């Protein structure tokens, strides 16, 4: 989980073209507020993931997975953890994926719709798809945080609103 900005303010990150690519704000980490909003909307439970761990480094993924498990314990029945392990991270990432499924009890894994020039139908991902299937995990595909080809979506912040899904 990212820490709150030192000044407590919300922060938006922009790409090289000045297009917003990520916004950091308290609703990303304030689980009490999440639960309050869920209650107001009539939502019983929510899947919990973290942008830092979506296709992230192994140590960050482990930390996030442990923190998500703690959130499940702190808010019984309200949050469902999703495993974080880089799909191209090799045997160590798959070991973490198995730990999430077998020890932490997570039923899914999260990846982004594109990362490091890799798209969901890339042959490089076949071992990941096989491992997720073997472990019985659903795959939550989060829209990419950055686009490989953002130009058609530069205007009006379209990259974040509709472009990342494509």
Image (cartoon, rainbow, N blue to C red):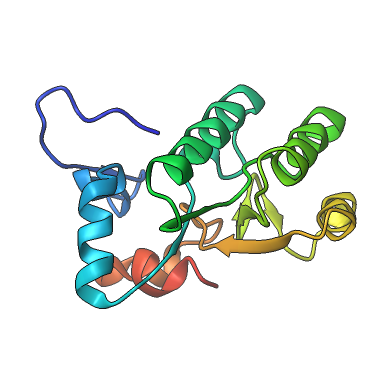
- Measuring 28% from the left and 70% from the top, which residue is drawn there? 155
The quadrant the N terminus occupies is top left
**Numbered label tally:** 0
The quadrant the C terminus occupies is bottom right
Considering only vertical position in the picture, is 36 above or below 97? below
Q: Is residue 124 left or right of residue 113?
A: right
Q: Is residue 95 left or right of residue 154?
A: right
Q: Of residues 66 and 23, which is closer to you in this image? A: 66
Q: Quadrant of residue 43?
A: bottom left
Q: Quadrant of residue 141?
A: bottom right
Considering only vertical position in the picture, is 65 above or below 166? above
Residue 53 location (% of width, % of height):
54, 39
Q: Is residue 144 left or right of residue 90?
A: left
Residue 86 location (% of width, % of height):
69, 40
Residue 115 location (% of width, % of height):
62, 49
- Measuring 49% from the left and 40% from the top, which residue is drawn there? 68
Residue 100 location (% of width, % of height):
69, 41
């Amino acid at each position: 989980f990212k820490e709150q900005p030192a000044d407590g303010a919300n922060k938006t990150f922009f790409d090289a073209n000045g297009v917003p690519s990520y916004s950091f704000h308290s609703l990303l980490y304030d689980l009490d507020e999440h639960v309050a909003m869920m209650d107001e909307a009539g939502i019983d439970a929510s899947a919990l993931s973290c942008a830092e761990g979506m296709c992230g480094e192994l140590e960050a993924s482990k930390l996030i997975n442990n923190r998500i498990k703690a959130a499940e314990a702190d808010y019984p029945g309200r949050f469902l953890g999703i495993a974080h392990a880089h799909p191209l991270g090799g045997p160590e990432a798959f070991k973490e994926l198995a730990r999430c499924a077998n020890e932490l009890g997570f039923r899914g894994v999260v990846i982004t719709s594109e990362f490091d020039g890799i798209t969901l139908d890339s042959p490089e991902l076949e071992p990941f798809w096989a491992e997720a299937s073997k472990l019985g995990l659903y795959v939550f595909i989060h829209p990419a945080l950055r686009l490989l080809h953002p130009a058609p979506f530069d205007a009006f912040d379209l990259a974040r609103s509709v472009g990342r899904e494509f």
